[in-house]
Image (cartoon, rainbow, N blue to C red):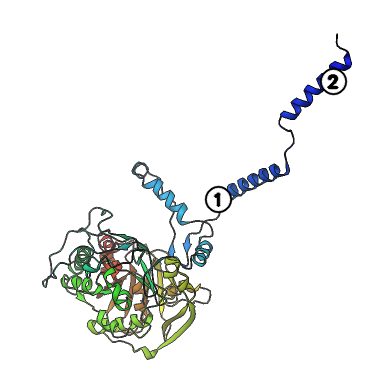
Amino acid sequence: MESKHSQDAQHSSRTGQEQKHSPSHHHSPRQKTDLLNVLLMGVLVVGVSLWFLLGTRPTVSEIENRNLAKFPEFSWDAYLSGEYTEGIANFYNDTVPKREWFKNLTASLRRHMGVQLEDDVKFYGNLHVNTDSEPELQTTPVEMEPALTTEPTHTQTGTEPVTTVPTRPAESQQITAATTVTVEENADSKEDGEISNNILIYKKRGIMLYGGSYAAGRNYASYVNAYKSDLGKDVNVYSMVIPTPCSYYMPEKYQYLIGSEQGNIENINAHLNGVEPINVYDILGQHTDELIYPRTDHHWGAIAAYYAAQEFASVANVPFRDISRFEKITKPGYVGTLYGYSGDIVLKDNPEDFVYYAPEEDYTTTYYNSDLTNQRNGRLLINLDKVKPVSWYLVYMGSDDRITHIQTQTKNGRTLCIVKDSYGNALTPYFMDSFEHIYVIDMRYFKPNAIAFMKERNVTDVLFAMNTFSATGPNAKKIEQIRTQ
């Protein structure tokens, strides 16, 4: 029989061996550090996720000069079609907390990004190469096309299918290998159809790439013709389709990337019936050495609007005030909407002057909400002292989503109604000597019936004034919508 001392020794030996081979109950310093890192990363991920989910979401983008997406309203039809869930995703994606700060940070970090072509040309977006043929222009007006009765599909902007207009399609493959090329019928657009998602940066200038559509142009003409038919022979109706910088500043070797704005405008004018065209394409082309377009913004300049207004006054046979009778106001440090859309640091680092012209007198300007409610008086040209530079184009009437009425000191019985996108805003101050009353409505936001509105106010002249992206893009159908709503 073994002694108690021997048994204790054996038990102690076995216990020592078990402890030697069993895992330790104590973590090493490295294990503690790894565990702490995992916990910190988990807290950080959860915290950031909650901040993105629950943080204050912006409603307006100042650097892009637009309203951001709104949370969609629920309906079973929208839910079953997927439109509702898509709208939720778009809302959260478009309204990220501190989105302006993130966009500026991204621009700084991506200083050399974008599709780099030759000759210091940089491209943002998806290249939309034009592949179809331009139809021959008809020299006689066409009959009225039917009004919109249903919403068009994504490949339509009116009653006819939309196809892009080519210029020199034989060169369509002369893009550098680094460029991603896609062929689509209709380019994406922002700023309510006014601004292209495809932007070329060239010599510190942003240039939107215009695709064009002869079919959409014919639809636009038919919509404008309908106003002339409804208003009658005693009301003068005019169409001013305004070109953009790509017509005048696009590098020659990259002309094949855009459609012809001149060709599209001529196509529209050829299909007008009883409507007087106001052709400003050649007039602006005579002043390309002046500040007719900002380098960093998608709008046109105040001096370009002056030349266009002068041409309209000549065709309408009304008096017109010379530019010398306006106060020229210059504000340095302007960086407009094209930086917001492209994020290109070259535009941000090269601000420009913002110039506008103020009439000598103050005028009684009455504003209404887009449904003709909330009448109030205000200034025609707003004070920009507390407005951020990216929004300085809002100097004209302050916003698009309102109705404006100006009563001038002119007594000639002429009443003008301008139906416009934001390009039309810059025309308004120049007509103080031309019309007794001026009404300004934006077809994207206007709620009343446009024909009834014009008849009730004894409108004698109607001017449709918008850029080519609106006239041959999704905005065109809004002209017909406000006529029939």
Quarter in which the N terminus is drawn: top right
Taking the spot 19% from the left edge, 74% from the top edge, the residue there is: 266
Q: Is residue 255 left or right of residue 388?
A: left
The crowd level at tag 2 (other Cα within 10 Å; few <14, some 14-19, many 20+) is: few
Q: Amino acid at mark 2?
A: Ala
Quarter-of-image position of residue 427: bottom left
**Image location (x, y in percent) of residue 483:** 25, 62
Q: Is residue 69 above or below residue 230?
A: above
Compared with 405, 143 (above or below) is above
In the rendered structure, which amino acid carries the disc numbered 1? Leu
Rendered residue at 18%/75% (across/down): 234
* The label number, if any, that marks residue 214 in the structure image: none
Q: CA distance from mark 1 to mark 2?
A: 65 Å
Q: Nearer the viewer, mark 1 or mark 2?
A: 2
Which quadrant is home to the C terminus? bottom left
Q: Secondary structure at mark 2?
A: helix
Q: Secondary structure at mark 1?
A: helix
**Disc sitting over residue 54 in the figure:** 1
Task: Write down the residue under mark 2.
Answer: 9
Please tell me which of labels 1 and 2 falls first in the chain.
Answer: 2
